[in-house]
Image (cartoon, coloured by chain):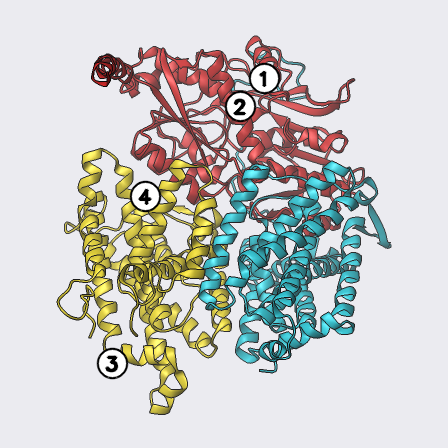
Chain colours: A cyan, B red, C yellow
Amino acid sequence: MQGASLSVGAPSPQPSPRWGEGVRTSKPDRGDVRHDDKSMLYFIEQFLNGIQLGMLLFLLAAGLTLIFGIMDLVNLAHGSLYMIGAYFAATFAEWTDSFVLGAIFAIVATLAVGMALEVIAMRRLYARSHLDHVLGTFGLLLFFNELVRLIWGPAGMTLSLPGEMLKAVEILPGLFYPVYRLVIIAVTLAVAFLLYALVMRTRLGMLIRAGASNREMVGALGVNIKLLYTMVFGLGAALAGFAGLMQAPILTVQIGMGENILILAFVVIIIGGIGSIRGAFVAALLVGLVDTVGRAFLPDLLHVYLSESAAASLGRALSSMMIYMVMALVLIVRPEGLFPAASK
Amino acid sequence: MRRTATIPVAVLALCAGPAVAQQQAQQTLKIGFVSTFSGPVAAIGNDMKNAFELGLDHHGRKLGGLPVEVVYEDDQIKPDVGVQKTQKLIESDHVNFIVGYIWSNVMLASLKPLVDSKTMTIDANAGPSQLAGELCSPYVFSTSWQNDQTPAAVGLYMNQKGVKTAFLMGPNYAAGKDMLAGVKTTFKGQIVGEEYTRWPDQLDFSAELSKAREAKPDAIFVFYPGGAGIQFVTQYVQAGLKGQIPLYTAFTIDDLSLPRLKDLAIGIPGAQEWVGDLPNAANQKFVADYKAKYGVPPSFYGAQSYDAVSLIDSAVTAVKGDLSDKEGMRKEMEKAEFKSVRGNFKFGNNHIPIQNFYLQDAVKNADGSYALHTVATVVTDDQDRFHDRCPMK
Amino acid sequence: MKGLLETSRGSRPSPRLAVNAGLLVILALAPLYAALTGDPFAMTLFTRVLILALAALSLNLIMGFGGMVSFGHAAYLGIGGYAVGILAKEGIGSGFVQWPVAIAAAALYALVVGALSLRTRGVYFIMITLAFAQMTYYVAIGLDRYGGDDGLTIYQRSRFGSLLDLDNKILFYYLCFALLLAGIYLVWRLVNSRFGLVIQGARSNERRMRAIGFATYRYKLVCFVIAGAMCGLAGALLANHTNFISPAMMHWTRSGDLMIMAVLGGMQAMFGPLLGAMTLLLLEESLSRVTDYANLVLGPLLLFVAIYVNGGIDGLIGGVRHG
């Protein structure tokens, strides 16, 4: 047989050792050990994770809601911009050997791509029906996936963090939270405030708000609508790209990475109200928290009533469905969303 | 002028015709290869493809005397795509052999068309328990293992290290469930937690790592293949758990993920049926030539694909190129008389190898590169525990 | 009342008639082609075209004619498929039980979804139908007994006693063909009936229809249920065709595929969904044989159609449509 090294205290050699006749159960009988241990710290950690997911969703949803609210465009390719931002960041970070520089260049590059996309393709879709938007932007989604595969190959990339961010910090006694996730929360909050300042305090922001609530009027007032649209789309693209690159160190950079989160972003803007950034912010946090905290606690909540394995699979299914149920509820009760922007 | 020129051209064409026909008369051995070439786990598919190509090179691009043509298909980790690609290979490309299948769920989904069409299949990675048991088929051979075997070896090792309580984690698909069940067959301690994460798109393990920390086990056991393994180990370290709660793994740290994990992987043991430094001659040639051709060391995925080449060669040689003699090929393959890079092994009645499992650890070489290194043999001639359920004798 | 094969006014045969008739002939002869060229894969591909055309047809009934843009139609494919798969696993292999259950289950879900969703309109309707489809997707993932995310192999196709042997690929193909033709005929009759006129009227101006006195909500709901039932049948066919069911059948991108087939083919045309399904699938297949990067062509093509083409492929063939 194999001339291998010494056996590590194995049971006395037999012709074909049997590993044991353990009956296969899908879940063990754990007893009540874990439930007594569930503590506040765990909840806080999940809460923070939920905030972090919510903030990233906000970045994506803010652009999406503006584009939908102002240009009335259903953009399925928004997730592609998220993906492109991540790919750019991974590439530039490799070239410059710096995460921060890579991120900055990536945002600029995604902004450029977004504006180019608007001029070349999107503006021709505005006059068409929503269905045509779906068809056209779906085609763009396919195109971008393939283009990325052509340029960067099918395997995906990694975006590594600088060493300091790889640690965990003890933010509360006994609660360790990864530094990078704190950075995400802080940075995205800063961007949210900047966005707020832009929309509330600048002329451009005023035009955006006006366009979101009454498109025709703004055009009638003599504003350069075309330029406004290009800038709004570019802004949305930059936000999406930024979200993509922030998330990349956690989830890796791969083709089609925007598709799952795109659906969540649509849910967010529906709940928040189309065209409303404030709505997007609140709804994004809500969705992020419901999804994360729900996933973490629902199986255990169900375990009170059901058996272990039933609770686990039902819990998994239900927690995935939860945000859709929330959205369906909002649509039935208050279809215009929590903070509707349009006055039409 | 032109008229005279056409005559030599016509003559040439006439001569070329029979030559072409003759080339077509000599049969090619068509092999379909189903693996994953997209997404973060593409590295696995590429490793398998590279090793397969190297194996073909070593055999002079001919197996059993027949020239080989390979068609590679990407299953995108999805069972429904995998079964479609399998059907395409069978019905449209008319392949004689199919090799591959990284994922147990893709393998199981693709099984029916393979068996219905009586296509000789070599499973070069997936090890679902059903394939070793009630769904075994005379046409399907494995050059890998059955999913329970490797984690069972780890479980044994955990006993030896005095681990009394363990928290288990794995992806929620066929192999994930098999792996965690496999650990439980040998591990004698108490399981204080068992988490299944969404596969393949959940790469954020913060929630489950928190639960693990909460449960305060003596050790954590995980199974996360491919890119997910990189993500998990990175997050495990990021969460500050390394040094607090030891980690034991199966198929999570391999030659593909090691160059990316670097120091993070040191001190995290795993088990495998093949390690790069196994001393037999076939393996030394394989590893050396692989490194020379591709610049990086091969992984166990590649080793299994490389063995598939030799297995096919032995079969086709035995029937002297008569690919319709499937009985003959099967009988020859069952003897497992080829030189495997893991050393000689036998097939069980269910066509799953009966083989050794080794403990492996990550080390840093003097030149700064990282490698996996055999620490000990955990078990010899291990046979999976499902072979009794297989109706074949 | 418009003719089924779309003859134009007057005696000059329209190009549309030629294309539709030609399409039927090609489809009728496809098994012959597959047998002659020894390429069983062509049969597999064309059968798939037929089944998805039936699904797209059901979507077009509510979307093209009814103006109800459902982004969750793949859910009915999944429900129909899972009905067959679950019954097969539990030992009930008879098609006489499986298929009616598939249709009924899909119709029931359509009733629930429709009742709730039809209270909204526009993009809200799109999103809420999407939400319901996502829920079925996640429920399917949670069904551990039936494979969950890994899917479930169906070892034995639906049995119809000595009447039909669905393992016979040619027979199965013609069965799907017959069902598709029956579906087209049904949709044609529906659309051109009083019921259909109310639906189309509601699409163009709902307020007016209600003012006239039609309870448009009820009409739309019935239409929605019929579409769901038809798609459930397509799901049963699909499960039989692939011998495999998985939650992927219900993923939102599959709903997107169906929408694209309907829009591409031409939403006002009876044969639109078939045209769209055939074009999309054949284009995907042939492009992938030529290049590894098929979507670099397909993507912009879809965009082009979205921007410039009115009425889909059918619109390109037959020129401007009225009504």
Q: Tell me the number on the disc at residue B293.
A: 1
Tell me: residue A331, above or below residue B391: below
Quarter holding the N terminus of chain B? top left
Q: Which residue is mark 3?
A: C194
Crowd tier of the residue under label 1, counting other residues whose Cα lies within 10 Å: few below 14, some 14–19, many 20 or above: few
| Quarter of the image where one finds residue B238 | top right
Look at 47% across and 58% down and name the residue there: A136
Q: In this view of the protein, which residue sits in the foreground, B345 or C208?
A: C208
> Quick one: label 2, few (<14), some, or many (20+) residues within 10 Å?
some
Q: Secondary structure at mark 4?
A: loop
Query: Marks 4 and 1: in contact by CB < 8 Å?
Result: no
Q: Chain of mark 1?
A: B
* Type of the residue with mark 1: Lys
Q: Nearer the viewer, mark 1 or mark 4?
A: 1
Identity of the residue furthest to the front in this view: B1
Residue that numbered label 2 is attached to: B50
Q: What residue is pinned by disc 4?
A: C155
Image coordinates of residue B6 in percent, x first then y, are 23, 17
Report in which chain the residue with disc 3 lies: C
Distance in Å between CA atoms under marks 1 and 3: 73 Å
Dot 2 and dot 3 within a common chain? no
Q: Is residue A65 visible?
A: yes
Residue A234 picture location, percent across and down: 65, 59
